[in-house]
Image (tube, rainbow, N blue to C red):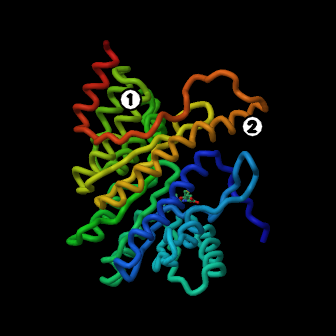
Amino acid sequence: MAERTPRPWGFWTRAKLDVLRDYLSAFLAASSGKAPYAVYLDAFAGEGSGIDRLTSAEFDGSPRIAAGAVANGNSGYRFSHLRLFELSGTRAAGIQAYLREHFPGRDIEVVPGDCNMTLPATLKSMPEAVRRSPTFAFLDPFGTELQWPTIAVIADHKRGLKYKVELWMLFSAAGLMRIAGSSPAKAAVGAEDRLTALFGNRTWEPIVDARRAGAISGADAREAFVNLMRWQLEETLGYQTTHALELKNAQGTSIYHMIFATDHPAGDKIISSLYAKAADALPAMADEARQHNTGAARLFPIAGEPSPPYKHDKPVEPEGFLASRASTQST
Ligand SMILES: C[S@@+](CC[C@H](N)C(=O)[O-])C[C@H]1O[C@@H](n2cnc3c(N)ncnc32)[C@H](O)[C@@H]1O
């Protein structure tokens, strides 16, 4: 069989995976000594590796990073159970074979198929001692493949215990308005169902209506979608804290937000510091990409600077959020 060529990715993928790598080591360090097990869930496992668009170097994707993750410090503590999910049977088999070869003896399972269908049963089959263990879930879809019931099942997995599963998801806020379209006639096929599946209800509708009517800007619509998802994670699912960091490409166009949810003070503290670090690093990464694209160093700032410093704000009640943005737009 011909060798598979990994997909080329922009610098924002490197930024995302840097945060993942650092977070997992810190998560393991915080869990080490407190529980016999630590669990990693990866609902959109991918190809196993990618190619950096700038350097052409191959880099590890999330499954390899998680399997290789070791607690900060000297404990040698690692994830005891890794459960990965991947729609493509070929990719799932490829990841399983790679991880079996490079991490022999580890309890790693790659489940092929739609994670929205397969993940609940996998969680249900976990022995009680494993269910009670510190658990981190990475949800990294391309677009709107993640469905609200899957998020809810993950949040509910450790019901009755002090801390829920920590959850880190990629949220394509920019893609949502593209799917919804500037009018119902311009909506993508199945747009309404996809948005409803993602949020679990039709609370997205006022945002789309406001944007279509020109009452809010595109950036406000993105922020409103992010606010809505965070609001639901906190108010509906009961997470104590959520964080969101926006990633933009070299031209300043929004690519996605990374939304994190935890009810553990350590998780809150670690992600705050990693998001601040990432927000600091992103402008230089974007500059490097621009210089690579244009072959010249940038003399003056261009429109759409990539990333302001990271600042945590609580999500607010969605109707109020929208009303405040609409009034700003009209003044
Ligand atoms: C952005 S990639 C994941 C990248 C990976 N997390 C990494 O860091 O290397 C998204 C992956 O999700 C898979 N996918 C799409 N829909 C899915 C679904 N419903 N269930 C499971 N996997 C899905 C795609 O085949 C693709 O490989």
Q: Position of residue 275 (x, y in %)?
A: 46, 47
- Residue positioned 52% across, 71% down in the render: 112
Q: Position of residue 247 (x, y in %)?
A: 52, 41
Residue 148 visible from this viewpoint: yes
**Amino acid at pointer 2:** His
Q: Position of residue 222 (x, y in %)?
A: 41, 35
Q: Residue 50: give its label.
A: none
Q: In the image, 178: left or right of 56?
A: left
Residue located farthest toward the front when viewing the structure as drawn = 74
- For label 1, being within 8 Å of ligand 1 is answered no
Q: Secondary structure at mark 2?
A: helix
Q: Secondary structure at mark 1?
A: helix
Mark 1, residue position: 220
Residue located farthest toward the left when viewing the structure as drawn = 160
Mark 2, residue position: 292
- Residue positioned 74% across, 29% down in the render: 297
- Residue positioned 54% across, 61% down in the render: 21
- Nearer the observer: mark 1 or 2; the answer is 2
Distance in Å between CA atoms under marks 1 and 2: 31 Å
